[in-house]
Image (tube, grey):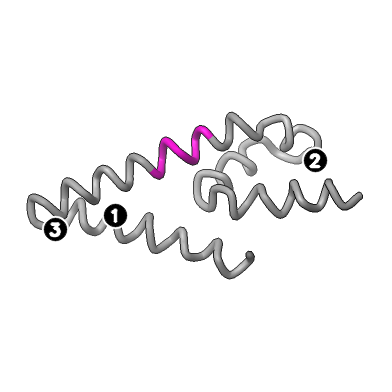
Amino acid sequence: MESLKYSVFVIWIGSAAAAIFGGPTAAGIGQLVFLGTLVAHLAEFVWKRSLFERVGGSASHHFVQTMIYGLFYWKPIEDGLKRR
């Protein structure tokens, strides 16, 4: 799972590059993917906020990591708590 979380960078960078440098169609798709990823990760943070409160630490750290990596950040934390 650790290596998969870096694949999210491809989505962020690829969609931003398409939005900035792409033609009209590619730019539109890039914007939709970028905004869709942003909204999905924000929803994940709100949905998993109680998980982050249980494990402690900085809420801003959890927010940034979730916004970047999404489920590839919080899923290993959740699995670790279930194994306890």
Which amino acid does the dot numbered 3 rest on?
Gly
Q: Which mark is residue 22?
A: 3
- Residue 62: x and y in percent read 64, 42
Task: Decide: few, some or many residues near mark 2? Use Cα within 10 Å; few <14, some 14-19, many ≥20.
Answer: few
Please check the rendered image and state whether residue 2 is part of the magenta-colored stretch, yes or no.
no
Label 3, label 2: how far apart the Cα atoms are: 41 Å
- Secondary structure beneath disc 2? helix
Q: Residue at x 62, y 52 (%)?
A: 73
Q: Nearer the viewer, residue 65 or 25?
A: 25
Please check the rendered image and state whether residue 40 is part of the magenta-colored stretch, yes or no.
yes
Q: Residue at x 75, y 46 (%)?
A: 78
- Residue 8: x and y in percent read 46, 58
Which amino acid does the dot numbered 1 rest on?
Ser
Q: Which mark is residue 55?
A: 2
Decide if residue 68 is on the left or right side of residue 63.
left
Mark 2 or mark 1, which has the lower sequence index? 1
Mark 3 or mark 2, which has the lower sequence index? 3
Task: Decide: few, some or many residues near mark 1? Use Cα within 10 Å; few <14, some 14-19, many ≥20.
Answer: many
- Secondary structure beneath disc 3? loop
User: On the image, which quarter does residue 21 sit in?
Assistant: bottom left
Q: Residue at x 58, y 39 (%)?
A: 63
Label 2, label 1: how far apart the Cα atoms are: 32 Å
- Secondary structure beneath disc 1? helix
**Residue bearing the label numbered 1:** 15
Decide if residue 9 is on the left or right side of residue 61.
left
Q: Residue at x 28, y 53 (%)?
A: 16
Decide if residue 30 is on the left or right side of residue 53.
left
| Extent of the magenta region | 37-43
Decide if residue 20 is on the left or right side of residue 15.
left
Q: Main secondary structure of the magenta part?
A: helix
- Residue 56: x and y in percent read 79, 38
Which amino acid does the dot numbered 2 rest on?
Val
